[in-house]
Amino acid sequence: FCRLSAKQLSLIKPQLDANNVRLVGIGLEEVGLEQFIQGDFFNGELYIDTKKQCYKKLGFKRLNVLSIFPSVLSKSSREALNKAKQENISGDFRGDGFQNGGTLVVAPGGEVLVSYKQENPSDHMDIQEIFRVLGIKEEL
């Protein structure tokens, strides 16, 4: 799911660049990092937080054994898997699949304009909402 989301965010990098907006990703581990970079899934700046400090401070939910299966079997997860398949984006399911993340939109002064938190692994912030919050008028 993260590869699909990263690829979708990378599609808007030209619009972000044109509006002086940085695209930054923060991963939680080095497992699969080399394949992620080689697969060109994300075109922004990429950082790794192996201690998951930012995930904890931002309140990003961690799933458990009982909550992961309903989340992965949900309608939105099936739709995301189909979309990834259509776009030839494969995953290897290695690493920590229990940690949910999210999307932050931060103003130049550090004010958080939006803090979107995933409820399940396939949830992602709508691209048009990112444009709206940033005041970017372009459509995909």
Image: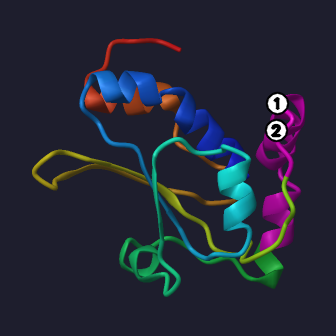
Query: Label 2 crowding class (10 Å Cα cut-off): few <14, some 14-19, many 20+?
Result: some
Residue 122 visible in the shown view: no
Residue 59 lies, with reference to residue 86, above or below; the image says below
Q: CA distance from mark 1 to mark 2?
A: 5 Å
Q: Where's residue 105, x and y in %? A: 32, 46
Residue 34, image quadrant = bottom right
Identify which residue, 51 or 99, lies in the foreground.
51
Residues marked 1 and 2 touching at CB (< 8 Å): yes
Magenta-colored span: 68-90
Q: Residue at 64%, 49% (x, y): give it.
A: 123
Residue of label 1 = 87
* Amino acid identity at mark 1: Glu
Residue 118 visible in the shown view: yes
Residue 84, image quadrant = top right
Left or right of 105 in this view: 20: left
Residue 108 lies, with reference to residue 27, above or below; the image says above
Residue 84 numbered mark, or none: 2
* Amino acid identity at mark 2: Ala
Query: Label 1 crowding class (10 Å Cα cut-off): few <14, some 14-19, many 20+?
Result: few
Q: Does 30 lie within the magenta span?
A: no
Secondary structure, mark 1, is: loop
Secondary structure, mark 2, is: helix
Q: Where's residue 45, x and y in %? A: 43, 52
Residue 89, image quadrant = top right
Residue 116 numbered mark, or none: none
Identify which residue, 109 or 66, lies in the foreground.
109
Q: Does 75 lie within the magenta span?
A: yes
Residue 96 lies, with reference to residue 138, above or below; the image says below
Report the predominant secondary structure element of the magenta stretch: helix
Q: Where's residue 42, x and y in %? A: 58, 45
Q: Residue at 61%, 67% (x, y): give it.
A: 100
